[in-house]
Amino acid sequence: MNRITKLFNIKYPIIQAGMIWVSGHKLASAVSNAGGLGLIGAGSMYPEVLREHIQKCKKETSKPFGVNVPMLYPNIEEIMKIIVEEGVKIVFTSAGNPKTWTPYLKENGITVVHVVSSTVFALKAQNAGVDAIVAEGFEAGGHNGRDETTTFTLIPMVKEQIEIPVIAAGGIANGRGMLAAMVLGADAVQVGSRFAASMESSAHENFKNTIIETKEGDTQLTLKELAPVRLIKNKFFQDVQNLYEKCPTKDELVTLLGRARAKRGMFEGDLIEGELEIGQIAGLIHEVKSAEGIILEMMADYNTARKEVVDLDF
């Protein structure tokens, strides 16, 4: 048992990322039942939809689970109220100042984790009183840090500066990646892309199939003027790149993006005009598996890699 498994009372130091349009109650409960920590992704849910997913998750697992809350979304007050009312014990916050909601959550007996992309923000989160931080590298899918710091670089720098537990995220989809992150100083890993391509993921089958077809170099970070996001290079991505050639204003980028692009691509399965958010590690994902199968495979791979490292002789 390490600091994170003890903090969350889980078997394995594997946390499923709270991804929009992917992380409903089915995935969260499946990950928790398999010994990890499942997270419901509140970012794509209206408040009452979130309440429904929390209630279903409580029926589907007796194990700990949490909710991921991007703080830049509307209805944040109502979302936080529902989380407290429903007795959620773990909350991961992101995309905002941790000082805003951490005291409220802690006062209600909730363990708080904040997602950061730099040492500066890791220190701010620690000073705000969070219980742990997720340090997410530039390899990650979806919305990302502006500094483009890779996980391999970020984890040891954050570890050097903070005292609370560190969860590594970005570019981790197997046990070898998990071992590497923990050698660098992480207490656990947060895994997104691999669980997006799981049987229990609420992503559209078209998107799941696209993930397992994605190769090295098929994703890229874009839209930094709005909010940096890593996308698969489909037609919509190319439309963005074509617009960049004309030196667009921020308003022109907003107009092209429109509304509900991520829902259109990831949840509804529009592979042409939709926004397809996935990490660089997709090139190592070759099949859709159950959440339990993913966790067991990761742990077996981790243990094998650990023995191989021990056996090295220089």
Image (spheres, helix red, strand yellow):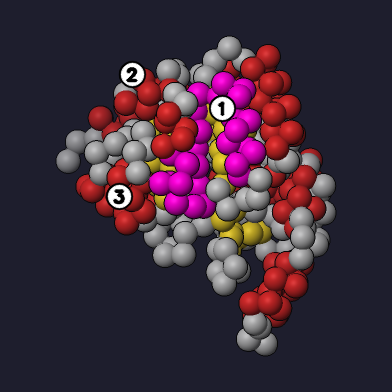
Which is in the foreground here, disc 1 or disc 3?
Answer: 1
Image position, residue 24 (x, y; %): 69, 32
Q: Earlier in the sequence, mark 2 or mark 3?
A: 2
- The residue nearer to you, when weighing 102 against 159, is 102
Gap in Å between the C-alphas at discs 1 and 3? Answer: 26 Å
Amino acid carrying label 3: it is Leu
According to the picture, the residue beneath numbered tag 2 turns out to be: 1
User: In the rendered view, does 250 fall on the left or right side of 155?
Assistant: right
Q: On residue 123, which mark appears?
A: 3
> Is 94 one of the magenta-colored residues?
yes
According to the picture, the residue beneath numbered tag 1 turns out to be: 84
Gap in Å between the C-alphas at discs 2 and 3? Answer: 25 Å
Residue at image coords 56%, 27%: 84
> Is 170 one of the magenta-colored residues?
no
Image position, residue 273 (x, y; %): 80, 62
Which is in the foreground here, disc 1 or disc 2?
Answer: 1
User: In the rendered view, does 1 fall on the left or right side of 57?
Assistant: left
**Magenta part of the protein: which range?**
76-102
For label 2, the SS is loop
Look at the picture and state if 182 lies above or below 223: above
Amino acid carrying label 1: it is Val
